[in-house]
Image (spheres, grey):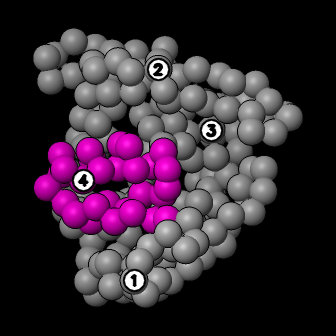
C-alpha cells in the first residue's frame, strides 16, 4: 500500500537485464521502480512497516544501490543512516570486510565509530542474492559493537540461498524470486 492507499505491483517495476554485469547473470534493475513515485513510496513504506517493531537506531546500507532506499528508510524510521562504502571512500578510521558476490569478490568499509556500542541496526540492501554483502555488513556491525536486529531487502533471489548466510536472523524482502 502507498500512503494514498492504492496498491502498487512492485514486481512489475523490476526490469531484467540479461548478461549484466557478466554473461550468465540476470540483473534485476530497480530503476523503473525509482522512476515511479507511487512505487518508490510503496517500497519505502513497505520496508518501514516491517522494520518499525525492531526499534531501529541505525540503518546500514551498502554502496551504491543500497543507499537509495536505505537513507529514505532511515528517515522513515527516525533512525540514523550509516553508509557502507567501497575501500578508500570514507574519510575517517574504518573497518573493512571482504565478501564474495555471485560474480566476484568485493569489500566494504564502515567508519569505526559509526555505531555506538549496543546500537540497534537494520541492514538494508536493494537485493539479497548469495548473502555475501549482507553477511559482510553484519560482521562489520558486530565488530564495532552494534546489534543486528534484522535485514530488509527490496528483492530476494531465493534460489541463490542468501538467507542461509544470515544465521537465522529476521529477514524480509518485498519481492521474492524463487527461480531464475
Question: Is mark 2 in CB contact (under 8 Å) with mark 1?
Answer: no
123 sits left or right of 49 in the view: right
Question: Is mark 3 in CB contact (under 8 Å) with mark 4?
Answer: no
Mark 2 secondary-structure assignment: helix
User: What is the spatial separation of the Cα atoms under label 1 and label 4, in whole angstroms?
Assistant: 22 Å
Quadrant hosting residue 147: bottom left
Q: Looking at the image, is mark 2 or mark 3 nearer the viewer?
A: 2
User: What is the spatial separation of the Cα atoms under label 3 and label 4, in whole angstroms?
Assistant: 24 Å
User: What is the spatial separation of the Cα atoms under label 3 and label 1, in whole angstroms?
Assistant: 34 Å
Residue that label 2 marks: 32
Residue 63 % position (x, y) = 49, 55
139 sits left or right of 82 in the view: right
70 sits left or right of 57 in the view: right
Residue that label 1 marks: 92
Residue that label 4 marks: 74
Q: Looking at the image, is mark 1 or mark 4 nearer the viewer?
A: 1
Name the residue at 28% across, 20% down: 37
The answer to which of marks 1 and 4 sits earlier in the sequence is 4
Q: Which mark is residue 157?
A: 3
User: What is the spatial separation of the Cα atoms under label 2 and label 1, in whole angstroms?
Assistant: 35 Å
Mark 3: few, some, or many residues within 10 Å (few <14, many ≥20)? many
The answer to which of marks 3 and 1 sits earlier in the sequence is 1
Amino acid at each position: 500500500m502507498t500512503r494514498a492507499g492504492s496498491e502498487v505491483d512492485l514486481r512489475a517495476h523490476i526490469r531484467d537485464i540479461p548478461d549484466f554485469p557478466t554473461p550468465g547473470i540476470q540483473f534485476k534493475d530497480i530503476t523503473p521502480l525509482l522512476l515511479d513515485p507511487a512505487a518508490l513510496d510503496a517500497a519505502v513504506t513497505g520496508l518501514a512497516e516491517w522494520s518499525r517493531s525492531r526499534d531501529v537506531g541505525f540503518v546500514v546500507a551498502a554502496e551504491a544501490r543500497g543507499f537509495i532506499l536505505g537513507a529514505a528508510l532511515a528517515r522513515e524510521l527516525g533512525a540514523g543512516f550509516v553508509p557502507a562504502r567501497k575501500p578508500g571512500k570514507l574519510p575517517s578510521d574504518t573497518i573493512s570486510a571482504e565478501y564474495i558476490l555471485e560474480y566476484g569478490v568485493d569489500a566494504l568499509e564502515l567508519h569505526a565509530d559509526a555505531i555506538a556500542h549496543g546500537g540497534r541496526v537494520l541492514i538494508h540492501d536493494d537485493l539479497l542474492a548469495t548473502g555475501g554483502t549482507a553477511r559482510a555488513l553484519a560482521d562489520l556491525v558486530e565488530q564495532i559493537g552494534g546489534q543486528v536486529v534484522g535485514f530488509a531487502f527490496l528483492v530476494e533471489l531465493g534460489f541463490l540461498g542468501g538467507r542461509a548466510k544470515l544465521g537465522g536472523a529476521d529477514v524480509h524482502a518485498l519481492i521474492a524470486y524463487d527461480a531464475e
